[in-house]
Image (spheres, rainbow, N blue to C red):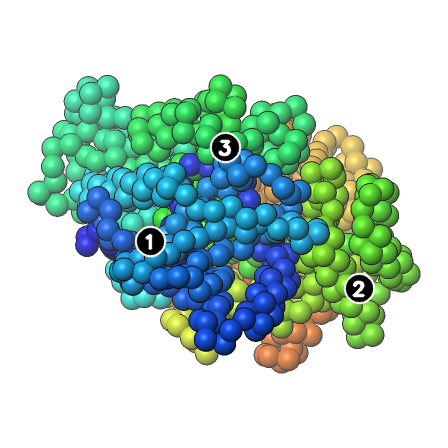
């Protein structure tokens, strides 16, 4: 869909307009609808062959039937012009005109009543009606009739439903709804052109003085922009100010703000709220200011007059600020109101008859009225009252919102991206994309394009498959189970085994098209596994992915994407503007390559902004401890030295515990055991292996009060999320550079890089860059604001080597070299 709000014109694929809805999508829309269309392709071919055979026996003077006929034209409605294009399945000759037939495949058994089909599939009847309307406009005077032909996927049984005057009336009402929605969106965009806000900081922090205009100007270059600023710089406020400016200048109609963790989304909402909170010199906020931001679900802003203007605010601003509607889309599971989360339209009453229930429930208030509360409790309460899934309420609200906030997956995961990209107002060419914690994006996208399959899963599915399931389907599933069961552990599958696997998945996918099971009768796990089979086949056939097919254990397969850079780059280049924000960027060349934005690709390369943070320049006092070797083979020889160093740091920091960062739990546990033996008076606490955000906070607060040494694992959720240690821990030990474990997966990545950049650089990108990035992430959390200080020991002789030191942040690269115990004592005693 392409919308020109200024000219009140919209370009649709004809099916898009038929499916357009300001509420929940029809039950057969989305990914399952696309898969159903694939299942029906065979029936379309068969029905076409039948029509051709029948027409061949008739008099040759008659007009021949036509198939996949292109139909295009324009319809006017309430001041809007809809420009449409589509293809009708069949156009059959008829007296004075033509008879149009649209074929639809259904997994539901036939026959069903015509009214039941109209209620379940209103978009099908609207699509046929649009074909008829455009045909009548193109050929006035000719008579056109139409019918929908439903085909039962499992059997090929047909049921025809003729298009009626009632269907035509329903189409007129639908076009009115679409025009009204577009007009509402047009009014919202006009209001955005005079958007006002309060800067995130009353006075800029050192280094922030020009960063907002610099960022806006960099976005004008057309290249994706990397904002590399340290933890504590205030990136979130800077990003929001730049995004608001982008919207007000009309360079985008929407902002999509993605983060890698839910905690990041909560922080964005809190910053957003601060930027539009009432000020003392504003009028009564109950009159002129409205804000609703719930527990990570949504927010709407309407700020009033009389406040201090933002630095880029034009003098011609109106006295009252317009609304800016923001929505944070949380995972489906968090919305669910059932006791057991099992998302099946057949099993969940909150997914039944959604279009009718939506029309009667008044739930459009969530995107029409900015002051409406949108937190998860409010959405659950509204959903329960209306009998509608709260997640569907959230999805339906997105098209009317100006800022979408969510996880990386909603744009970059093939399983989840439809939530954003299938929205009726989605247009990346008119969207500013902001990606926070962007250094995580390449690994997260590669993970999203990776899959797994085990013999145990297949065996459980066979046991669950109903007795009445088609025998050919069960036979192909058993063949795949036997194949996977026989696999030994292997660093990679040989080509013969890969070919056998692809053949088995291809045969199974063919049976799924011919004999689909009753998905509603399966558990969610079983149904998801069936949907996974075509995905696995597509993975094997996708030549664009750098991938590894391997078996970590017998009877278990991993479909691992090693590098998703081409997919990331393709998506990033589609946006009006892209900002990639990070506190710990990889080297420019490595980051550009990981994002698929290297100079030899089509489109612009990255543009980097590195604003200064002068308050960090003297905040770290670093010592490079060259006494120890923390490589896997030699680290045990130095456990006593590591334990003694922790004790010395604790003695030098009597007012606060020491933070210690290790590359693994096993290494940390070994040193803790030595610390307890050699220094029994000291208490060390190792981070829990798994804990949610609340548990992490509770553990840290407790151990800050009780322990002498807080032990973290580099790269874990604690080590990258301990923002509240800034200013509270003054001494830290980093034990080794945390290089990834050498295994089949890393060796495959290294080999893939070596083909492109050579062995030395491949080793650097595979092991050194991710390892040192973990160190930078952990240490960045210790100093988050001006005035905070930290003394850090980098505890391994490798930190003194140029290849390692060059990958550290500048403030960690230089320091005192510790050659013996006396050097350490002198450094600790120095001011």
Mark 2 vs mark 3: give the one in front: 3
Q: Residues within 10 Å of mark 3 (few under 14, many from 20)?
A: many
Q: Residues within 10 Å of mark 2 (few under 14, many from 20)?
A: many
Task: Determine whether the residue tagged by mark 3 lies in a helix, strand or loop.
Answer: helix
Mark 1 residue crowding within 10 angstroms, few (<14) / some (14–19) / many (20+): some
Mark earlier in primary sequence (1, 3): 1
Q: Which residue is mark 3?
A: 354
**Sooner in the amino-acid sequence: mark 1 or mark 2:** 1
For the residues labelled 2 and 3, say whether their Cβ atoms are less than 8 Å apart.
Answer: no
> Can you identify the residue that label 1 sits on?
133
Please tell me which residue is depicted at 91% across the width and 61% down the height of the picture.
486
Residue 133 in view here: yes
The residue depicted at 41 percent of the width and 25 percent of the height is: 360
Q: Quarter of the image containing the N terminus?
A: bottom left
Mark sitting earlier along the chain (2/3): 3
What x and y, as percent, mark residue 584? 49, 55
The picture places residue 722, in percent across and down from the top left corner, at 55, 39
Instruction: Report x, y in % for residue 463.
Output: 86, 43
Work out whether residue 407 or residue 454 is closer to the camera in this orientation and state it.
454
Q: Observer-nearest residue: 64 or 136?
A: 64
In the image, 718: left or right of 666? left
Q: Distance of mark 1 from mark 2, alpha carbons?
A: 46 Å
- Quick one: SS at disc 1? helix
Query: Would residue 506 appear left or right of 265 to someone viewing this image?
Result: right
- Most extreme residue toward the left is 316
- Evaluate whether residue 559 shows in this view: no
Residue in the picture at 8% in, 42% down: 316
Q: Which residue is mark 2?
A: 504
């Amino acid at each position: 869909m392409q919308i020109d709000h200024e000219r009140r014109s919209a370009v649709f694929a004809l099916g898009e307009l038929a499916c357009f809805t300001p509420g929940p999508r029809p039950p057969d829309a989305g990914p399952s609808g696309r898969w159903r269309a694939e299942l029906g392709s065979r029936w379309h071919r068969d029905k076409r062959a039948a029509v051709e055979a029948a027409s061949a026996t008739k008099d040759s003077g008659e007009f021949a039937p036509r198939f996949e006929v292109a139909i295009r034209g324009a319809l006017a409605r309430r001041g809007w012009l809809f420009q449409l294009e589509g293809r009708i399945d069949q156009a059959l000759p008829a007296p004075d005109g033509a008879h149009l037939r649209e074929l639809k495949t259904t997994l539901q058994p036939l026959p069903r009543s015509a009214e039941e089909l109209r209620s379940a599939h209103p978009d099908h009847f609207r699509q046929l009606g649009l074909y008829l309307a455009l045909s009548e406009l193109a050929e006035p005077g000719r008579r056109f009739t139409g019918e929908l032909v439903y085909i039962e996927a499992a059997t090929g049984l047909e049921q025809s439903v003729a298009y009626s005057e009632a269907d035509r009336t329903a189409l007129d009402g639908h076009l009115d709804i679409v025009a009204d929605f577009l007009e509402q969106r047009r009014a919202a965009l006009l209001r955005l052109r005079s958007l006002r806000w309060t800067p995130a900081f009353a006075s800029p922090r050192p280094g922030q003085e020009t960063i907002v205009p610099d960022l806006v100007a960099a976005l004008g270059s057309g290249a994706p922009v990397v904002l590399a600023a340290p933890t504590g710089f205030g990136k979130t406020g800077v990003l929001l100010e730049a995004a608001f400016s982008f919207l007000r200048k009309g360079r985008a109609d929407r902002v999509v703000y993605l983060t890698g963790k839910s905690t990041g989304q909560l922080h964005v909402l809190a910053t957003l709220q601060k930027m539009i909170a009432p000020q003392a010199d504003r009028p009564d906020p109950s009159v002129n200011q409205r804000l609703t931001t719930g527990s990570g679900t949504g927010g709407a802003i309407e700020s009033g007059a009389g406040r201090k203007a933002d630095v880029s605010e034009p003098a011609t601003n109106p006295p009252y600020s317009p609304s800016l509607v923001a929505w944070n889309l949380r995972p489906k599971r968090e919305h669910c109101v059932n006791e057991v989360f099992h998302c099946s339209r057949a099993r969940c009453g909150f997914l039944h008859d959604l279009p009718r229930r939506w029309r009667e429930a008044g739930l459009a208030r969530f995107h029409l009225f900015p002051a409406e509360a949108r937190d998860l409790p409010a959405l659950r309460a509204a959903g329960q009252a209306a009998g509608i899934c709260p997640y569907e309420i959230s999805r339906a609200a997105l098209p009317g919102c100006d800022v979408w906030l969510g996880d990386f997956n909603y744009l970059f995961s093939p399983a989840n991206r439809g939530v954003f990209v299938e929205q009726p107002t989605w247009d990346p060419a008119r969207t500013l994309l902001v990606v926070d914690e962007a250094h995580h994006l390449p690994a997260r996208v590669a993970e999203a394009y990776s899959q797994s399959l085990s013999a145990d899963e297949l065996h459980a599915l066979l046991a669950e498959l109903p007795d009445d399931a088609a025998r050919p389907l069960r036979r192909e599933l058993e063949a795949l189970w036997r194949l996977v069961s026989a696999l030994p552990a292997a660093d990679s599958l040989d080509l013969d085994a890969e070919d056998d696997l692809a053949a088995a998945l291809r045969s199974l996918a063919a049976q799924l098209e011919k004999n689909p099971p009753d998905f509603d009768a399966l558990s969610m796990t079983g149904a998801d596994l069936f949907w996974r089979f075509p995905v696995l086949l597509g993975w094997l056939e996708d030549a664009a992915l750098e991938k590894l097919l391997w078996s970590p254990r017998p009877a278990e397969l991993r479909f691992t994407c090693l590098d998703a850079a081409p997919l990331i780059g393709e998506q990033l280049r589609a946006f009006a503007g892209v900002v990639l924000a990070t506190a710990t960027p990889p080297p420019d060349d490595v980051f550009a390559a990981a994002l698929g934005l290297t100079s030899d690709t089509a489109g612009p390369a990255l543009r980097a902004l590195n604003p200064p943070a002068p308050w960090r320049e003297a905040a770290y006092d670093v010592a490079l401890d060259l006494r120890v070797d923390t490589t896997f083979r030699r680290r045990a020889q130095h456990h006593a030295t590591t334990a003694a160093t922790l004790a010395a740091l604790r003695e030098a920091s009597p007012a606060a515990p020491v933070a210690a960062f290790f590359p693994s739990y096993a290494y940390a546990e070994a040193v803790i055991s030595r610390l307890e033996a050699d220094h029994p008076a000291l208490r060390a606490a190792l981070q829990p292996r798994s804990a949610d955000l609340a548990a992490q906070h509770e553990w840290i607060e407790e151990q800050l009060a009780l322990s002498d040494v807080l032990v973290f694992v580099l790269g874990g959720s604690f080590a990258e999320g301990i923002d509240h240690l800034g200013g509270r821990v003054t001494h830290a030990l980093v034990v080794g550079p945390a290089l990834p474990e050498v295994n089949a997966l890393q060796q495959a990545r290294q080999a893939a890089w070596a083909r492109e950049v050579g062995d030395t650089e491949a080793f650097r990108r595979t092991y050194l860059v991710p390892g040192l990035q973990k160190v930078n992430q952990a240490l960045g959390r210790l100093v988050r604001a001006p005035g905070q200080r930290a003394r850090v020991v980098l505890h391994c002789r490798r930190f003194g080597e140029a290849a390692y030191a060059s990958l550290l942040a500048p403030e960690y690269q230089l320091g005192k070299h510790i050659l013996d115990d006396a050097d350490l004592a002198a450094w600790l005693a120095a001011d």
